[in-house]
Amino acid sequence: MTNDLTKDAIIIGAGITGLATAHFLKTQGVSTYVLEKDPHVGGTIRSGRVDGFLVEYGPNSALDTSPVLHELFESAGVADRLEYANNKSQNRYIVRGGRLVNLPMSPVAFLKTPLFSTSAKLRLLKEPFISRSNPDTEESLADFVRRRIGDEFLDYAINPFVAGVYAGDPEELSVKSSFPKLFELEQKHGSLIKGAIAVTNQFFHLRKKLGIGPATIKQCDLMATCQGPAYDVWTNKTCSTQHQYFQFFPVFCVCKARCHHKSRSSHHKTQ
């Protein structure tokens, strides 16, 4: 038996990257052949039903950060099947010591939480004095976090986040490629804490410069987008609509129009 492999392109791997690539190539009239070693497609993205509950074996959400995602959803005919995260999902829990612990989302909650030990919290005081890395040196996300804020934050904050969005291993992910804003914070300000303070100060400076009152300004949360003319506090330039701000730390956005905030973490329904 012979197989006809006269295709324009061969894609190795039927994960989300391979499938999306094949789809976009097909829309451009490029014939493709996708190779996959596993008996199922989707790579690390897998859903299942266990005792009536929906279980995600890989990533459980996606950050809505690019219009390319919506182009893919529309062309694949699944745009009407998107589900945006419920507001209740902002209450996140991490397992530590065999029990669920609420992830702190404010400075006061952080000081009170048992999720991080006292020594780990005090370790943060050291962060502004740690030297920045060599920009030409490749560093994993895990090594970056250990170096700057310690092992506990890697285990109980970064690792769960990376697993839920990337289904990746922080030891294998490049901080420069996967989390460029973190890398930029350190390189530009020499510290994550100093960088966060600088961004906040820039926000207030922009607010004063633009003469915009507090009523038209909101704080962008982890997965918020601003719809309408907005100013990116990173570049001090006008942003396009539905601009996704810094995806890791809460930062401010300044809007000239009414600012609509909506959780943009999405995934497909499982039928």
Image: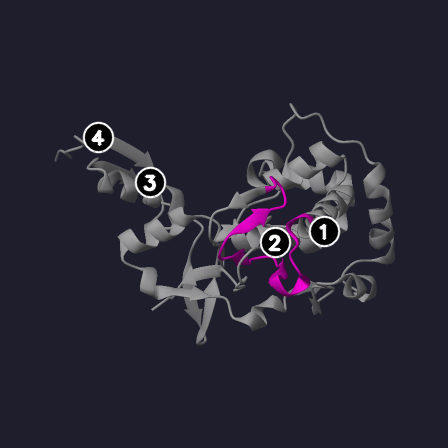
**Which numbered disc flags the more N-terminal residue, 1 or 2?**
1
Mark toward the viewer: 4 or 2:
2
Q: Which residue is mark 1?
A: 204
Quarter of the figure with the C terminus: bottom left
Quarter of the figure with the N terminus: top left
Q: Position of residue 74 (x, y in %)?
A: 30, 55
Mark toward the viewer: 3 or 2:
2
- Outermost residue toward the front in this view: 211
**Which numbered disc flags the more N-terminal residue, 3 or 2?**
3
What is the distance, in whole Å, between disc 3 and disc 4 at their CAs?
Answer: 13 Å
Residue drawn 23% across the image and 37% down it: 32
Q: Which residue is mark 2?
A: 254
Q: Which mark is residue 21?
A: 3
Question: Horizontally, is 175 left or right of 244 in the view?
Answer: right
User: Relative to 49, is 184 above or below?
Assistant: above
Secondary structure beneath disc 4? loop
What is the distance, in whole Å, between disc 3 and disc 2 at their CAs?
Answer: 35 Å
What is the distance, in whole Å, between disc 1 and disc 3 at their CAs?
Answer: 42 Å
Question: Horizontally, is 238 left or right of 219 in the view?
Answer: left
Secondary structure beneath disc 3? helix
Residue drawn 82% across the image and 35% down it: 130
Tell me if I can see residue 41 in this picture. Answer: no
Q: Which mark is residue 8?
A: 4
Front one among 263 and 197: 197
What is the distance, in whole Å, between disc 4 and disc 2 at their CAs?
Answer: 47 Å
Would residue 59 be counted in the magenta stretch? no
Residue drawn 63% across the image and 50% down it: 248
Amino acid type, mark 2: Val
Amino acid type, mark 1: Phe
**Which numbered disc flags the more N-terminal residue, 4 or 2?**
4
